[in-house]
Image (cartoon, rainbow, N blue to C red):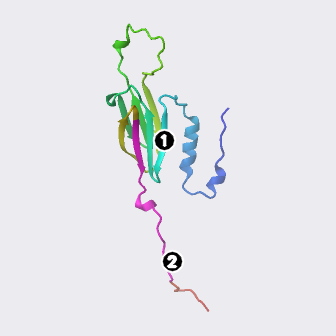
Amino acid sequence: MRNSTDLTPLYRSFIGFDHLASLMDQASRAEKQPAYPPYNIELLGENNYRISMAVAGFTENELHIESKQNTLTITGTKPTNKNNEGRNFLYQGIAERNFERKFQLGDHVKVIGASMENGLLHIDLEREIPEAYKPRKIAINNNNSGVNNT
C-alpha cells in the first residue's frame, strides 16, 4: 500500500505550484536507484551547486553526461575486460560495473561544466533566474479621476 499525500490545502494559497504535486507523485513512484556509485550534492553559493561522484576506475571516455528536459543523466560504461579472464580474485571489492544515475533538475538549472580529479567526477550546476522571475518594484498610480474625496 502506497502512502499518498493530499496537497489540496496547498492549492488554496499557492497559485501556479500545481506542478510540484506531479513531481512529488512522480518521485514517490520512481524506482529506487542503486547506491552505486556514491555521490555528494553541494551548495556552493546561492545559485551554484556541485555533484561529486566517486567513479574510481573509470576514464573520461567511459563516462557520458547528458542534460535533457530537466533530467541530468550520468552513465558509466566499462568495456568487457578480457584481461580479467584467467585472473583469480580472492576478494574483488573494486566495482567495475556499468551504472546510470539520474538527477531531476529544478527549473532554470543548467550544467555549466564537468571535470575529473582524483577519481571524482565533479559536475557544476547553476540556476539562472530569468529577468521575468526576478523581484521588481510595482509603482502605485495616484490616478484619482472618478474618485470623490469629499
Could you tell me residue 69's position as x and y percent? 42, 43
Disc 1: CA contacts within 10 A as few (<14), some (14-19) or many (>=20): few
Q: Is label 2 in a helix, a strand or a loop?
A: loop
Identity of the residue drawn at 48% across and 75% down: 139
Q: Which residue is mark 2?
A: 140
x, y percentage for residue 113?
35, 43
For residue 24, above or below residue 77: below
Is residue 106 visible from the viewing direction of this image?
no
Q: Which residues are magenta?
A: 121-142
Q: Nearer the viewer, residue 130 or 15?
A: 130
Instruction: Indicate whether 64 appears above or below 144.
Output: above
- Specify the quadrant that holds the N terminus: top right
For the C terminus, the image quarter is bottom right
Q: Mark 1 = which residue?
A: 41
> Is the C-beta separation of discs 1 and 2 under 8 Å?
no
Q: Is residue 111 magenta?
A: no
Q: For the point 36% across and 40% down, which residue is it?
A: 114
